[in-house]
Image (spheres, rainbow, N blue to C red):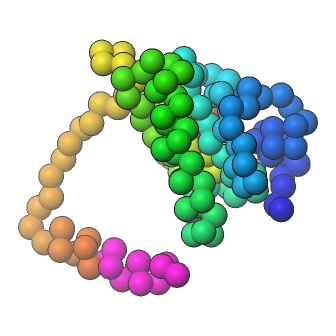
């Protein structure tokens, strides 16, 4: 099992620092975010240390993601939220602060003013076809 002694989430896994744990199984752990965006905001993490989701082997990421629906149902029941966002910040540019892969589950109510403002753009000319081809080529390399 990989562990980084400097990592806050590894310390939670090892019970070296406290956390309000709501769920655990052999490979993952869910606990309350210490700085919640909404009451009941959860973090779901793998027990093993991976810097980000893209660093996880496919089976392990699949196992982690499979916990989301059950955790989401409990979140809706406990918080009385009308919905929730699943957010994964990948890399510092995307807002990732803790370099241990994690998934945010953020309770939402209509009109709660949380959330992104989407500055929608559009594609020109051949860009969609060019991108689709580049993605298909890259995926042939990355898929296992
Ligand atoms: P990120 O921006 O990396 O996606 O989010 C990291 C989240 O982890 C933040 O929302 C932050 O409040 C939470 N967090 C950071 N350190 C701790 C900690 O020691 N305990 C808990 N429970 N949450 C933490
Ligand atoms: Zn870690």
Q: Position of residue 73 (x, y in %)?
A: 48, 34
Q: Position of residue 26 (x, y in %)?
A: 75, 54
Residue placed most toward the observer, 82 or 43: 82
Query: Does 96 appear above or below 33?
Result: below
Image quadrant holding the N terminus, namely bottom right
Q: Position of residue 60 (x, y in %)?
A: 63, 64
Residue placed most toward the observer, 67 or 3: 67
Image position of 95 (left or right of 138): right
Magenta stretch contains residue 140: yes
* Residue at point 33%, 74% (across, down): 135
- Answer with the quarter of the image where residue 35 lies: top right
Residue placed most toward the observer, 100 or 91: 100
Residue placed most toward the observer, 52 or 121: 52
Magenta stretch contains residue 20: no
Image position of 8 (left or right of 52): right
Query: Does 120 appear above or below 90?
Result: above
Tell me which segment is drawn in magenta: 134-144
* Residue at point 68%, 32% (across, down): 22
Q: Tell me the chief SS of the magenta region.
A: helix
């Amino acid at each position: 099992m990989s562990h980084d002694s400097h990592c806050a989430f590894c310390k939670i896994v090892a019970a070296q620092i406290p956390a309000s744990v709501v769920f655990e199984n052999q490979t993952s752990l869910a606990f309350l975010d210490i700085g919640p965006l909404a009451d009941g905001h959860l973090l779901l993490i793998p027990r093993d240390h991976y810097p980000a989701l893209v660093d996880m082997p496919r089976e392990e990421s699949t196992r982690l993601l499979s916990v989301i629906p059950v955790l989401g149902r409990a979140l809706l029941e406990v918080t009385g939220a009308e919905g929730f966002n699943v957010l994964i910040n990948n890399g510092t540019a995307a807002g990732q602060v803790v370099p241990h892969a994690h998934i945010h589950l953020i309770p939402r109510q209509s009109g709660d003013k949380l959330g992104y403002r989407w500055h929608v753009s559009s594609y020109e000319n051949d860009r969609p076809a060019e991108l689709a081809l580049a993605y298909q080529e890259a995926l042939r390399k990355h898929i296992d």
